[in-house]
Amino acid sequence: MSLNGTYDPDNIFAKILRGEIPCAKVYEDDQVLSFMDAFPQTSGHTLVIPKTPSRNLLDTDPDMLTHVIHTTQTIASAVKTALDPDGIVITQFNGAPAGQTVFHLHFHILPRYTGGQMRDHASGQMADMDVLKQLAAKINAAL
């Protein structure tokens, strides 16, 4: 896949946006959805995505990108309040060689704890949906 390939409307995030696949929703407005990563690298791993089709940061409308990054900052602050991590990593990948596995723009909010290990990105270990929903509710309450 090239960095500038075409948007695939059947990617997993597009399916989540259409309600075809469930998610543990943290926050939603008319432009953005935030939810828990089903394959978390760390407890509290949260995603923020635009609702408009966009493969990556490089092909996203600048106004949309402004809203997405502002929402990412707001959600990261709520993660900090709700989960009290020692630090937070925010990542975003552009293209398969950079580590992108879902070709819909998304930001990862990763709470980090001193001495805690972080699993590999897209490791294949799916989390319990009830646990994810509890974390989502806790983060949402901190918004």
Image (tube, rainbow, N blue to C red):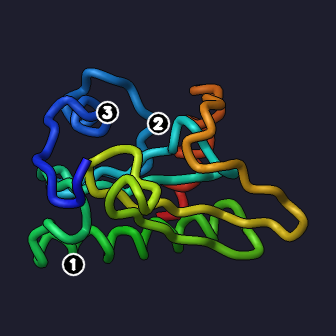
Measured in 3D between alpha carbons, the distance from the residue under mark 2 to the one under mark 3, in whole angstroms, is 14 Å
Q: Which mark is residue 24?
A: 2
Across the whole image, how many numbered discs are drawn on residues?
Answer: 3
Residue sitting at x 61%, y 29%: 126
Q: Which mark is residue 2?
A: none
Of marks 2 and 1, the one in the foreground: 1
Residue sitting at x 43%, y 46%: 35
The 10 Å Cα crowd at callout 3, few under 14, some 14 to 19, many 20 or more, is: some
The answer to whether residue 91 of the structure is visible from this angle is yes
Q: Is residue 50 above or below residue 64?
A: above
Going from N to C along the chain, the mark reached first, 1 or 3, is 3
Which secondary structure lies at badge 3?
Answer: helix
Q: Which mark is residue 66?
A: 1
What amino acid is at disc 3? Ile
The 10 Å Cα crowd at callout 1, few under 14, some 14 to 19, many 20 or more, is: few
Residue sitting at x 63%, y 52%: 44
Going from N to C along the chain, the mark reached first, 2 or 1, is 2
